[in-house]
Image: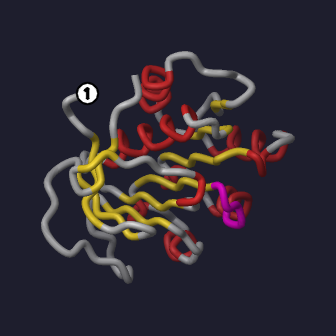
Amino acid sequence: MVKKILLNNQEFTFTENDLPILIHGAHKAGSSLFTITLISKLCMHGSKILFFSGYEMAKDEFRAQVEDIDTDKVEIIKRGDEYDFLKTIENIKDIDERVLLIKNVELLGEKAHLKFKDKTKLVISGDIEKCSFKEELLNIPYRTIILFSDLSNYSKVIPYELQQYEGYIWGSKKGVVKIDVRW
């Protein structure tokens, strides 16, 4: 079952109009579950998805939240490595119709960045501090930015201390986002 996303303690639904989205979080900050819930919600509302994650746990969580995955709408890149990512991006016919989720972006290199940097249906998530192409990544014109932890040398600064699993969002809305833990 898809979890609920809260913005300032009110249920909130992201749409493709919020894309591209950048989500940054250090290890254990809560950005991973949030990212999977966001992409699950987009999928449940009809978006076609191309799903990349470096780790099986994220894929398993996505499958658990979406339950009945329509294989025409969702393509999950099998292995979480750059080779499979590049091969899939080059061979998928309807890439521009799909929301491209890049979870664990820090596992990819500059070749991958060159393939996705101009996409508009994009959700980038990971520990941006560990990304080898951090500066280039931050130059993408995002409509929505969500920080679960501080990001050094970046124009957006979290205005106050957040609890674990909370992020701060800038975009069409501003405030604190989190997953409703009652679900």
Residue at left 64%, top 40%? 47
Q: Is residue 21 left or right of residue 173?
A: right
Q: Position of residue 61 (x, y in %)?
A: 42, 27
Q: Nearer the viewer, residue 85 or 132?
A: 85
Residue located beneath label 1 in the image: 183
* Magenta span main SS: loop
Q: Is residue 80 left or right of residue 13?
A: right
Where 26 sits versus 1, above or below? Answer: below
Magenta range is 117-121
Task: Report if residue 75 lies within the magenta region.
Answer: no
Question: Which part of the image, by quadrant, shows the C terminus?
Answer: top left
Residue 54 visible, this orientation: no
Q: Position of residue 27 (x, y in %)?
A: 29, 49
Other residues around mark 1 within 10 Å, as few (<14) / some (14–19) / many (≥20): few
The outermost residue toward the front is 10
Q: Which quadrant of the figure has residue 179?
A: top left
Residue 44 visible, this orientation: yes
Q: Position of residue 29 (x, y in %)?
A: 25, 50
